[in-house]
Amino acid sequence: MTMTRPDVRALLDQLAAAGGPGVEEQTPQAARDAMRAVLPVVDLPMPKLATVRELSVPAPHGSIPALLLDPRADRDPGPVVVWYHGGGFVTGGIDTHRGFAADLTRRLDLPVVLVDYRLAPEAPYPAAPDDAETAARWVAASPPELGRTADALILGGDSAGGTLAIVTAMALRDTPAPLPVLAQLVIYPATDLTRRYPSHQEFAEGHLLTEAGRRWYYGHYRPTVTDVRASPLLGEPAGLPPAVVLTAGLDPVRDEGRAYAAALVAAGVPTTFLEAEGNVHAFVLLRRAVPSSQADIADALTALRAVVDGARRPVG
């Protein structure tokens, strides 16, 4: 029997008592509005940073908004984190994830570019992976808008953003960008839409993300499930950058994250696998409501920092 943390249990009980429609009963816009409305209650505010700069990434369809965050006003050339937000490809954006991205940049002491890729249903699959790859290649070109010279990328994301980080890492492995990808950090990613996993059923209800909610998100996203960019577990993992994979123990997509980490290990990719036992999906946006989540995030970032430092350490 999987145990639930006390702070997670308190949140789930509070949500159950409050009632209200599930995401599957809402329009996409209503779901986006509800997400924005609840975040000040469940997540921490954005801390002050020396650099907060809006960016516009050129794209075939026009431009992709992004946000540069950095605790420093100036820094020497170094790695840049490209972060893709979660939200089931339908919700989420710069406004929902800037607080968490600010936490990333402070803890890692690295600049973070938070990418506001197009959302479904207005822009269904493959708009999101197209934008994710476009943004990463733009950062890898070290454009002057960044205000500094990047010398490597770190790709990361939570939930749907974790999926985008994986498929972007695959794209940059197969057709390299001007800069190398040092590492990938993926948090509770969806990796395989072609089969059922035990966690889908085990946590189908009562653990924040539900099976009905998953169907609603994918119904709007409309992916081609057998495409590698929708189900990256179907792709070849060999040659991908070192990975830190963090799953949630009470999450319908838990087993998809586990399977991805196992595939990386089997392919010889250096991988750190961590599981937030007793925690639920979306916990990076629940840092106030579920304070224990901060330790899970800190563990993953410590592991990522070790990977990055190891990759940049001189040989010999």
Image (cartoon, rainbow, N blue to C red):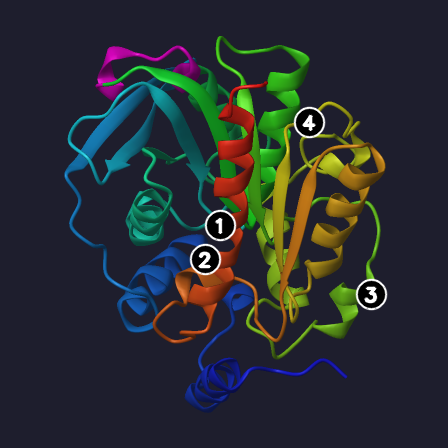
Give the crowd class for mark 2: few <14, some 14-19, many >=20 residues within 10 Å: some
Magenta segment boundaries in residue numbering:
138-147
Q: In which quarter of the image is the C terminus?
A: top right
Residue on which disc 2 sits:
298
Q: Position of 93 compared to 10: left or right? A: left
Residue on which disc 3 sits:
198
- State how far apart marks 3 and 1 are (Cα): 30 Å
Residue on which disc 1 sits:
302
Q: Is residue 124 above or below residue 75?
A: below
Residue on which disc 4 sits:
240
Foreground residue among 306 and 207: 306
* Badge 2 or badge 3: first in the primary sequence: 3
- Secondary structure of the residue carrying tag 4 is loop
* Badge 3 or badge 1: first in the primary sequence: 3
Is there a contact, CB below 8 Å, between mark 1 and mark 2? yes
* Badge 4 or badge 1: first in the primary sequence: 4
